[in-house]
Amino acid sequence: MDILVVEDDDNLRYLLAEIITELGFKCDLANNGKIAFELNIKNKYDLIVTDMKMPVMDGKELILKIRSHEKGKPVPIIIISGHTEIKDLLGLGVTYFLNKPFEESEIIEFINKSLGIAC
């Protein structure tokens, strides 16, 4: 399964990639929503993990563009952010929301649940 991580903080982006690859999944990286949107059109990911506050295109705009572009089953999206309240995500089609900072076990649980893997 292919997962896209969208995070402008280099350290967190690489930490998430390490966690995902240790779980046995392929992981691509983007540091803003514009790059992520282009990658998603090209690759059709099984899961997207994204921050909300990013340069160029933020997470909300990314999610709205992905949802308006999708055909068929929507891709699960996990938001990881310290700046967003859950009420802001209603109607965006977000699968899970995780506050920063988070525990590694939390992101692993949400990734597995999003992909339909029993924990």
Image (tube, rainbow, N blue to C red):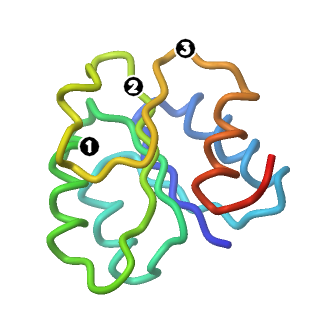
What amino acid type should be assigned to the residue bearing mark 1? Gly
Q: Which residue is mark 1?
A: 59
Q: Position of residue 89 (x, y in %)?
A: 23, 36
Q: Measured from the top left, where is residue 14 in percent x and y? A: 64, 40
Does the residue at mark 2 contact the one at mark 3 (Cβ under 8 Å)? no
Q: Are marks 3 and 1 in contact (CB under 8 Å)?
A: no
- Say whether residue 89 is left or right of residue 77: left
The answer to whether residue 56 of the structure is visible from this angle is: no
Mark 2 falls on what kind of element? Answer: strand
Q: Nearer the viewer, residue 63 or 96?
A: 96
Which is more N-terminal, label 2 or label 1?
A: 1
Q: What secondary structure is found at the residue carrying circle 3?
A: loop
Q: Amino acid at mark 3?
A: Pro
- The label on residue 51 is none
Q: Residues within 10 Å of mark 2 (few under 14, many from 20)?
A: some
Residue at 36 percent across and 71 percent down: it is 74
Residue at image location 16% in from the left, 63% down from the top: 65
Amino acid carrying label 2: it is: Ser
Q: Are marks 1 and 2 in contact (CB under 8 Å)?
A: yes
Q: Position of residue 113 (x, y in %)?
A: 64, 51
Give the quadrant of residue 13: top right
Rounded to the nearest angstrom, the CA distance separating label 2 from label 3 is: 8 Å
Task: Report the residue marked by disc 2.
Answer: 81
Q: Secondary structure at mark 1?
A: helix
Of mark 2 and mark 3, the one earlier in the sequence is: 2
Q: Residues within 10 Å of mark 3 (few under 14, many from 20)?
A: few
Image mark count: 3
Q: Residues within 10 Å of mark 1 (few under 14, many from 20)?
A: many
